[in-house]
Amino acid sequence: MFNRKRNSVPSSLRTREAGEAIHRARRLATDGSLRCARDDGFFRIFTRRSLIRLLTATAVLAGTNLLQPPLLAADPPMDVVASFSILGDMVRTVGGDRVRVTTLVGPDADAHVFEPTPADVRAIAASRVVFVNGLGFEAGWMPRLAEAAGFKGTVVVVSEGIRPLTMEEEEEEEHGHGGAHHAETPHDADDPHAWQNLANGKIYAQNIASALAAADPGGAAVYRRNADAYIEEMTALDAQVRAQIAAIPVARRKIVTSHDAFQYFGQAYGLQLLAPEGVSTEAEASAADVARLIRQIRSEKITAVFVENLSDNRLLDRIAKETGARIGGTVYSDSLSPEGGPAPTYLAMFRHNMAEFTRALAGS
Ligand SMILES: [Zn+2]
């Protein structure tokens, strides 16, 4: 505690007096003794209180109070937690320098089946706001984790206000012959992957800005400005995605991925999405699901399947071999790539996925 205060003294304030007092205090703090160095006739015996008085008096002379944080320093950033990497990037973008974001489920990791660690408990306990996607995405582990941390702050569900797709709707849209959903998923369950539609991404950004402003009113204008700029970028990217899809022949606008994470994408941008696994990676695809998907890939002449950065891709490899479809590339569904990879941010992920889809589908 003492050292922290000492370190908060700006170097410009280390006048001779302050420097000497600090030097003495350090020696006391280091050897744990209250007896001052013998060669100093004046400060023979200290009590902790007199030491503090001394430091305060000296600092006041030097123009500041050592026991208070320096007035000119910026406020420390607000600690917040985001449940997974895509959301972590969005919170960082809206929060800027005013927030310090800890992401629980990191790059290339799977939030559907996450096992929290004691470090995650500590991160939640130390945070003011916890951002989750909602729609059941973190339901298997976040409630337990927040309870273990004794978290009393705000949990913000960033998907609040979007129109959720449910399994049932998705099956209807596929005219009953699509997406092989495993039996364990209830039919009216929400599909959590709403971020795969940029229109929803804008709602996420707005929700993040409002929540940050509520927790840190002094930053409200900054959060608003950052969110507005971010939303503008999403609008521009949305138009690009539509233009790229328009260039793909209609009959080829069909995509197979390992788990059913792109229904929002497909619905927004006019692609048909198929997957051997359901909206969660938790359960394996049944043999019947896989057989149905293989028949469909053949009958609809689907030429490319896409592996995901987070899934075990052996099943998709097998499907590709059996159907003659190519592996079209790696796409990012539920988590970003590490820094330096092809999809280190939400917007980069969108651009990368679109580039992979068009490269594989637009061909003659
Ligand atoms: Zn998923």
Image (tube, rainbow, N blue to C red):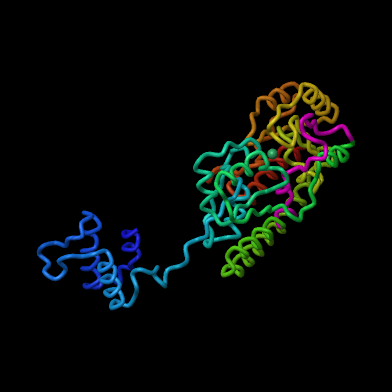
> Does the magenta segment cover residue 139?
no
User: In the image shown, does 360 or 59 lie closer to the viewer?
Assistant: 59
Determine whether, in the image, residue 45 is placed left or right of residue 54.
left
> Does the magenta segment cover residue 187?
yes
Report the span colored magenta: 176-202
User: In the image shown, does 110 or 34 lie closer to the viewer?
Assistant: 34
Q: Is residue 26 above or below residue 277?
A: below
Identified at 34% across, 73% down, the residue is 65
Residue 244: image location, x then y, percent: 75, 48
Determine whether, in the image, residue 291 is placed left or right of residue 31.
right
Q: Quadrant of the C terminus?
A: top right
Residue 282: image location, x then y, percent: 68, 32
User: In the image shown, does 175 or 251 lie closer to the viewer?
Assistant: 175
Residue 28: image location, x then y, percent: 22, 59
Instruction: Tell me which secondary structure the magenta stretch mostly adopts.
Output: loop
Identified at 41% across, 72% down, the residue is 71
Residue 143: image location, x then y, percent: 64, 44
Q: Quadrant of the N terminus?
A: bottom left
Identified at 53% across, 44% down, the residue is 120
Among the 4 quarters of the image, the one containing residue 272: top right
User: In the image shown, does 13 or 350 lie closer to the viewer?
Assistant: 13
Q: Quadrant of ligand 1?
A: top right
Among the 4 quarters of the image, the one containing residue 153: bottom right
Q: Is residue 126 above or below residue 55?
A: above
Determine whether, in the image, residue 348 is placed left or right of residue 251.
left
Among the 4 quarters of the image, the one containing residue 179: top right
